[in-house]
Image (cartoon, rainbow, N blue to C red):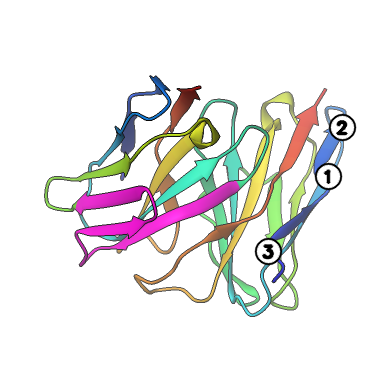
């Protein structure tokens, strides 16, 4: 059974810092990996999707990398802003378990002005 | 364009009652998913539809939970004899297709269910 872990569970940084969020998964047989953002009381907003054949994806100040063989992904946020404060979730889709996403527990990020 | 919509946004019910939660996916998306998120945790898969049929219902916790998608668009998640442990945010997602590594899922705002 796929298990996804996110470290740290919570993170507080001053505005302007570059930061890295970590995601690890136990079964490397995945179709893709998605990073989501969730604001309090809201749904999930898709940030980046990395296909199993890719190593990284970039969108603005966000860069996500994938090392499938070691079961790891990182989300890099450059020049953090208070508006980046949210919970960040990673999720993997296995290629032998239908189309379900298996989520990590999330990292709660607070960027202080 | 319109995203995934869910109604109601909040539902408060009493233990033992029956509830229905509705999901309206993005137009043209053939795949629809239901997830459940408890406080402080990541979402957990419940059921996935491809068209009108439930392709994978392995995440439904027990037979009190049932979901339908009769016309391949709107879906309803039905919970019978609700229990306090059913309290959670129920999230719906949709995607263009299934069985592809390009299958990006887009989520709705969720329905917060509280069972008293």
Q: Are marks 3 and 1 on the same chain?
A: yes
Chain letter behind tag 2: B
Q: Are marks 3 and 1 in contact (CB under 8 Å)?
A: no
Above or below A87: residue B69: below
Determine which residue is flagged by label 3: B3
In front: A63, or A107? A63
Whole-percent x and y of residue A76? 30, 42
Chain letter behind tag 3: B
Above or below A87: residue A59: below
As helix, strand or loop, the secondary structure at mark 2 comes to: strand
Decide if residue A94 is in sight here. Answer: no
In front: B64, or A105? A105
| N-term-proximal mark, 2 vs 3 | 3
Determine which residue is flagged by label 2: B13
Q: Are marks 2 and 3 on the same chain?
A: yes
Dot 3: few (<14), some (14–19), or many (≥20) neighbours within 10 Å? some
- Residue at x 70%, y 58% (from the top left corner): B67
Range drawn in magenta: A44-66
* A35 horizontally vs A73: left or right: right
Chain letter behind tag 1: B
Whole-percent x and y of residue A103? 42, 43
Determine which residue is flagged by label 1: B19
- Residue at x 43%, y 63% (from the top left corner): A99
On whether residue B45 falls in the magenta region, the answer is: no
Whole-percent x and y of residue B7? 81, 52
Calculate the distance from the C-alpha at mark 3 to the C-alpha at mark 1.
24 Å
Q: Which quadrant is the N terminus of chain A positioned in?
A: top left
* B31 horizontally vs B75: left or right: left
Q: Are marks 1 and 2 in contact (CB under 8 Å)?
A: yes
* A18 horizontally vs B109: left or right: left
As helix, strand or loop, the secondary structure at mark 3 comes to: loop
């Amino acid at each position: 059974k796929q298990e996804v872990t996110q470290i740290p569970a919570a993170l507080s940084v001053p505005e302007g810092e570059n930061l890295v969020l970590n995601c690890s998964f136990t079964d490397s047989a995945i179709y893709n990996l998605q990073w989501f953002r969730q604001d309090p009381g809201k749904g999930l907003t898709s940030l980046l999707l990395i296909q199993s054949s890719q190593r990284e994806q970039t969108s603005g100040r966000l860069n996500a990398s994938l090392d499938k063989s070691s079961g790891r992904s990182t989300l890099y946020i450059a020049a953090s802003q208070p508006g980046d404060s949210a919970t960040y979730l990673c999720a993997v889709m296995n290629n032998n378990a239908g189309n379900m996403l298996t989520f990590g527990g999330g990292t709660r990020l607070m960027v202080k002005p | 364009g319109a995203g995934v919509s869910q109604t109601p946004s909040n539902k408060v019910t009493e233990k033992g009652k029956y509830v229905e939660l509705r999901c309206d996916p993005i137009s043209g998306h053939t795949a629809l998913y239901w997830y459940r998120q408890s406080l402080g945790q990541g979402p957990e898969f419940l059921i996935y539809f491809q068209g009108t049929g439930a392709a994978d219902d392995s995440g439904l916790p027990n037979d009190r939970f049932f979901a339908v998608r009769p016309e391949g668009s709107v879906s309803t998640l039905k919970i019978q004899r609700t229990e306090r442990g059913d309290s959670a945010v129920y999230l719906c997602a949709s995607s263009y297709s299934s069985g592809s590594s390009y299958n990006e899922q887009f989520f709705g705002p969720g329905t917060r269910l509280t069972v008293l």
